[in-house]
Image (tube, rainbow, N blue to C red):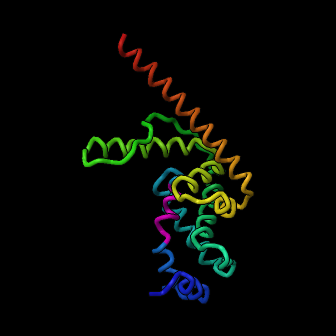
Amino acid sequence: MIDEATWIQQAQKGDVDAFAHLVHLYQTPVYNLAYRMLGERMEAEDAAQETFLRAFRNLSQYDPVRPFRNWLLAITAHYCVDRIRRRRPVLALDDELPVGKIGANSDDAVIAWETRERIQRLLLRLPAEDRAAVTLRYWYDCSYEEMAQILGTTVSAVKSRLHRARLALAQMLGEEGSRDREQSAGSKE
C-alpha cells in the first residue's frame, strides 16, 4: 500500500494516476468545505473541481512540512471566499435547531435533514471568512493553528472570527426563536 507522501511525490513528477488517487482521497472533504461555504451543490462541485485543478497546477509549491489536507482545504477556502465576494448573497432563514443522533424513525431523518438545511442557511448569512472558520472548526475539527495556516492568518484572528461568528449565529437563532414564538402566539388567538 502506497502512502500519501509517495502519491504526492509521484504526482509532483507528473503522474496523473497518482494525483487521481489524491483526488479520490480528498474529494469529500474538499466538496464538503465548498458546500458549507457556498451553499449550493453545483457551485460546490465546480469549486471542488477548481480546487483540484489549482492544486495540480501548483503541486510544485506544496510544502511537504504542511499536511496535504490542509493545503487543499486552504485552496478551497480561498477560492470559495473569492466566489462569495463576487456574488454577495443575502438569504432568508426559517428552519430548526441542531438535534442529536438520528434514530431509525423517519421523523428523525426528516428533522435531521431540516436541521442540516437550517445550519447551512445560517452559515450562508455569515461573512465568508467567518463561515470558513466555523466550517473548519466544527466540521473538520481543525485546531486554531491549523485554521490559521489554512486561512493564511493568525491564531488570534481565527479566534476573533470564531467569536464573531458564534455571536452572529446566536443572534440569528434568537431572532428566529422570537419570530417562531410570535407566530405561535398569533395562531392561538
Seen in the picture, residue 57 relative to 184 is either above or below; the reply is below
What x and y, as percent, mark residue 51? Answer: 57, 68
Q: Name the residue rendered at 60%, 57% in the picture.
A: 80
Q: Name the residue rendered at 44%, 37% in the picture.
A: 97
Q: Which of 52/138 is in front?
A: 138
What x and y, as percent, mark residue 126? Answer: 61, 43
What x and y, as percent, mark residue 31? Answer: 49, 62
What x and y, as percent, mark residue 30? Answer: 52, 64
Q: Magenta span has 126?
A: no
Q: Residue furthest left?
A: 105
Seen in the picture, residue 73 relative to 90 is either above or below; the reply is below
Horizontal side of 88 relative to 91 (left or right) equals right
Horizontal side of 152 relative to 73 (left or right) equals right
Q: Quadrant of the N terminus?
A: bottom left
Please give the count of numbered marks on the rendered protein. 0
Seen in the picture, residue 185 relative to 128 is either above or below; the reply is above
Q: Name the residue rendered at 25%, 45% in the picture.
A: 105
Q: Name the residue rendered at 60%, 49% in the picture.
A: 131
Q: Quadrant of the C terminus?
A: top left
Query: Which portion, as a residue range, is magenta?
Result: 26-35
Q: Which of 7/90 is in front?
A: 7
Choose top left, top right, bottom left or bottom right for residue 115: top left
Judged by its main secondary structure, the magenta piece is: helix
Q: Which of 92/177 is in front?
A: 177
Seen in the picture, residue 4 relative to 134 is either above or below; the reply is below
